[in-house]
Image (cartoon, rainbow, N blue to C red):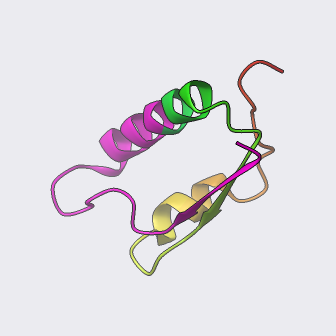
Amino acid sequence: MDELVLLGDIPDRTMSSTSEITTHVNAFIQTLGSAAKVHRCIFVPGNHDHTMWTDYAGLEAVVPGE
Protein backbone atom coordinates (compact mmCIF):
# COMPACT_ATOMS: atom_id res chain seq x y z
CA MET A 1 0.00 0.00 0.00
CA ASP A 2 1.50 3.32 -1.00
CA GLU A 3 -0.37 5.52 1.50
CA LEU A 4 -2.60 5.07 4.51
CA VAL A 5 -4.59 8.08 5.73
CA LEU A 6 -5.85 8.05 9.33
CA LEU A 7 -8.52 10.70 9.88
CA GLY A 8 -8.15 11.69 13.51
CA ASP A 9 -9.68 10.69 16.81
CA ILE A 10 -8.27 7.18 16.43
CA PRO A 11 -7.97 6.37 20.17
CA ASP A 12 -10.70 6.81 22.76
CA ARG A 13 -9.21 9.42 25.08
CA THR A 14 -11.98 9.03 27.68
CA MET A 15 -10.89 5.52 28.66
CA SER A 16 -7.07 5.80 28.90
CA SER A 17 -4.27 8.12 29.97
CA THR A 18 -2.15 9.96 27.39
CA SER A 19 0.74 7.59 28.17
CA GLU A 20 -1.40 4.50 27.54
CA ILE A 21 -2.84 5.99 24.37
CA THR A 22 0.60 6.89 23.02
CA THR A 23 1.88 3.36 23.68
CA HIS A 24 -1.13 1.68 22.07
CA VAL A 25 -1.33 4.00 19.06
CA ASN A 26 2.39 3.53 18.36
CA ALA A 27 1.97 -0.26 18.52
CA PHE A 28 -1.14 -0.10 16.30
CA ILE A 29 0.58 2.01 13.64
CA GLN A 30 3.74 -0.13 13.66
CA THR A 31 1.70 -3.36 13.37
CA LEU A 32 -0.59 -1.98 10.69
CA GLY A 33 2.30 -0.48 8.75
CA SER A 34 4.22 -3.73 8.84
CA ALA A 35 1.28 -6.05 8.07
CA ALA A 36 -0.08 -3.92 5.23
CA LYS A 37 3.38 -2.90 3.97
CA VAL A 38 2.41 0.76 4.18
CA HIS A 39 5.03 3.01 2.61
CA ARG A 40 3.60 6.26 3.97
CA CYS A 41 1.10 7.00 6.72
CA ILE A 42 -0.63 10.36 6.96
CA PHE A 43 -2.32 11.19 10.24
CA VAL A 44 -4.83 14.03 10.14
CA PRO A 45 -5.46 15.02 13.77
CA GLY A 46 -9.03 15.23 14.99
CA ASN A 47 -10.43 17.70 17.48
CA HIS A 48 -9.62 15.32 20.39
CA ASP A 49 -6.00 14.72 19.34
CA HIS A 50 -4.37 17.99 20.44
CA THR A 51 -2.07 16.39 23.05
CA MET A 52 -0.93 13.68 20.68
CA TRP A 53 -0.22 15.85 17.66
CA THR A 54 1.68 18.43 19.71
CA ASP A 55 3.87 15.61 21.07
CA TYR A 56 4.56 14.37 17.53
CA ALA A 57 5.00 17.76 15.85
CA GLY A 58 8.35 17.99 14.14
CA LEU A 59 9.18 14.28 14.41
CA GLU A 60 10.24 12.41 11.31
CA ALA A 61 8.34 9.32 10.27
CA VAL A 62 9.75 5.90 10.95
CA VAL A 63 8.94 3.45 8.19
CA PRO A 64 9.19 -0.23 9.13
CA GLY A 65 11.73 -2.08 7.02
CA GLU A 66 13.76 0.96 5.98
Is residue 12 highlighted in magenta?
yes
Residue at 47 percent across and 76 percent down: it is: 46
Q: Which quarter of the figure is the C terminus placed in?
A: top right
Which residue is at a point 81% across and 44% down the rendered structure image?
60
User: Residue drawn at (76%, 18%), measured in percent from left and top?
Assistant: 65
The percent coordinates of residue 45 (x first, y second) are 55, 71
Query: In the figure, is residue 62 to the left or right of 6?
Result: right
Whole-percent x, y for residue 19 in the image: 36, 42
Which residue is nearer to you in this view: 43 or 38?
38
User: Above or below — where is 33 with respect to 49?
Assistant: above
In the image, is residue 63 above or below residue 12? above
Numbered range of the magenta stretch: 1-28
Specify the farthest residue to the bottom: 47
In the picture, measured across the screen, residue 18 lies left or right of residue 32, that is left
Q: Is residue 53 magenta?
A: no
Q: Nearer the viewer, residue 61 or 6?
A: 6
Tell which residue pokes out farthest to the front in this image.
Answer: 1
Horizontal and vertical percent position of residue 15: 15, 55
Residue at image point 77% right, 46% down: 2
Quarter of the rendering occupied by the N terminus:
top right
- Is residue 59 found left or right of 55 in the rendered image? right
Q: In the image shown, does 11 or 21 lie closer to the viewer?
A: 11
Instruction: Left or right? Give the position of 17 relative to 8.
Output: left
Task: Tell how many labels.
Answer: 0
Identity of the residue furthest to the top in this view: 65
Q: Is residue 31 above or below residue 8?
A: above
Q: Position of residue 41 (x, y in %)?
A: 68, 50
